Image: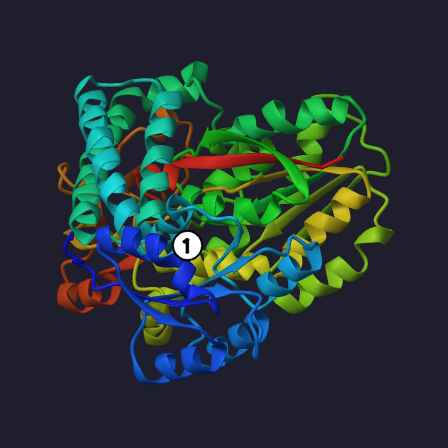
Amino acid sequence: MKSNKNKFIILWVDDEIGLLRSHIMFLEEKGYQIKTATNGVDALEIIKSTYVSAVLLDEMMDGLNGLTVLKKIKALRPALPVIMITKNEEESLMENAIGQKISDYLTKPINPSQILLSLKKNLESRNITRATQAQNYMQYFTKLSQDINMGIISLKKWVNIHKKMIEWEMEFDDNPQYDLQNILSEQKQSANEEFQKLVLNNYKNWVNGNADIPMSPDILNTFLKPLLENDKKVLFVVIDCMRYDQWSFIEPLLYDTFDIELHSHLSILPTATPYSRNAIFAGDFPDKINKIYPDIYANPEIDESMNSKEKQLLNRYLQKVHLNIKNGIKYIKINNAEFGKQIYSKFSDYNNNLIAMVINFVDMLTHKRSKSDILQEIIPDEASYRSVVKNWFKHSYIKKIFEKAAGLGFTIVVTTDHGSTNVEEGTIIKADKTTSDNVRFKVGRNLKIDNKTALLVKNPSDFKLPLTRVANNFVFAKDNYFFLYPNNYRKYKSLYKSTFQHGGISMDEMLLPVAILNQRK
């Protein structure tokens, strides 16, 4: 007999158990320990007094029938796997059993392999999955390492690398393997380092139209303009500060309602709302925006006012490309759930063919987490961050708005202006008092930094950034660094360490989703 390494004890309940001796011997040969009962009362007494791993339960027995026994088992041990075996193929019986959270349902006549498969699925799938997962990941690890070392320059290929890493992060969320997760984390760090080199070497070319995926200013032209030219009604939604991995958690919640086309874009630098989101709504880079509205970037210390012209920028874009939107556009910025609920309740009243909507929840969550011990406890890492964003979306007004918009014939285009990254290391910057107070990027004059930890841009026009009276330098943090001043270094390092920030150069901040949602027919 094979040793039962996992000590799986199976209780088989059948009033004709003597006829199943060959099946029992087969399972014992496979390493399972089998206990038997010929009626429901005895079975319940065994479950009360003895630990069992799973129950094989006959549906038709004298005395207590299978469904009655099932109900009592679930009252005693709700998580105990119960596999029901029956001659009855009536759909109502199956539905009743499923409703009582049966683990599996087998119809007689059964063979030993069927039972073995069901037991493995319910008792050993985790270990089997983990073994297969480990093998598959190590194959992926080898291939990715080769890709990184080849010096990939295509942003499309970098998006695929980023998405594959996210898939593995999500896989390990469901089936944790801490040794492999550590390897993945180190590999992601290596990939980020190579991606940053790519940005440093190619960003000037990309902003001049040589990127092989759209950048922030290209989103309207690439994704909205074709729809609007075909007289489609469009709901355009920008979820501020949403990462690609967070969208990957949200997307399955929409599968029942929508057909989804998933694309990608590259956020401009800085990966921050005043620059990347303005660029989205303007269809232009910040240097051009600055010429139209020089007050926007006149004082880089006042973030709140730097996105006050988004509706005007969008209208200007539509005029520039000669798009006349039926009934004009509706621009909505949602900063709290109560206002979001109001928008949902009156959404049907809007008769505009283009509705642009900015959702600030994820960005607010990111910033408030930095200052809240409670939120840092709830969101200690990327995995919990993904989970919180998913739960927010699942129960939020925005999912309901999507469903209502689809029913009204809207095509929904969803994206984000930038992502965020978990910062760990402080790096000193020297600057004057007019310098902006952002953590992952700075705007100011005569900024001095360590070139190993940050990129210094002395000529903003190279990156199509605005040159203003108070700002002639930009710096962007690399890796997981964040900027600190020499005074109060220890205090602020402790404050910002292990917080999610944006503005710098990383895959999570720059490689972003664009999803096009159409209601399923």
Image vertical order of residue 372 relative to residue 4, above or below: below
Residue 359 lies left or right of residue 327; in this view the side is left
Instruction: Point out residue 185 in the picture as x, y percentages from the top left corner.
Output: 21, 45
Residue 480 lies left or right of residue 123; in this view the side is left
Q: Residue furthest top?
A: 210
Q: Residue at x 38, y 29 (%)?
A: 159
- Which quadrant of the figure contains the C terminus? top right
In this rendered view, identify the residue nearer to me: 16 or 231. 16
Q: Residue at x 34, y 26 (%)?
A: 158
The residue wearing badge 1 is 386
Residue 241 lies left or right of residue 412; in this view the side is left
User: Does residue 446 show up?
Assistant: no
In this rendered view, identify the residue nearer to me: 249 or 82. 82
Image vertical order of residue 278 relative to residue 217, above or below: below
Q: Quadrant of residue 516?
A: top right
Q: Which residue lies furthest to the front in this view?
A: 18
In this rendered view, identify the residue nearer to me: 176 or 363. 176
Q: Which residue is drawn at 23% across and 39% down?
A: 188
How many numbered marks are there?
Answer: 1
Q: What residue type is labelled 1?
A: Arg
Q: Is mark 1 on a helix, strand or loop?
A: helix
Image vertical order of residue 40 relative to residue 191, above or below: below
In this rendered view, identify the residue nearer to me: 57 or 367. 57
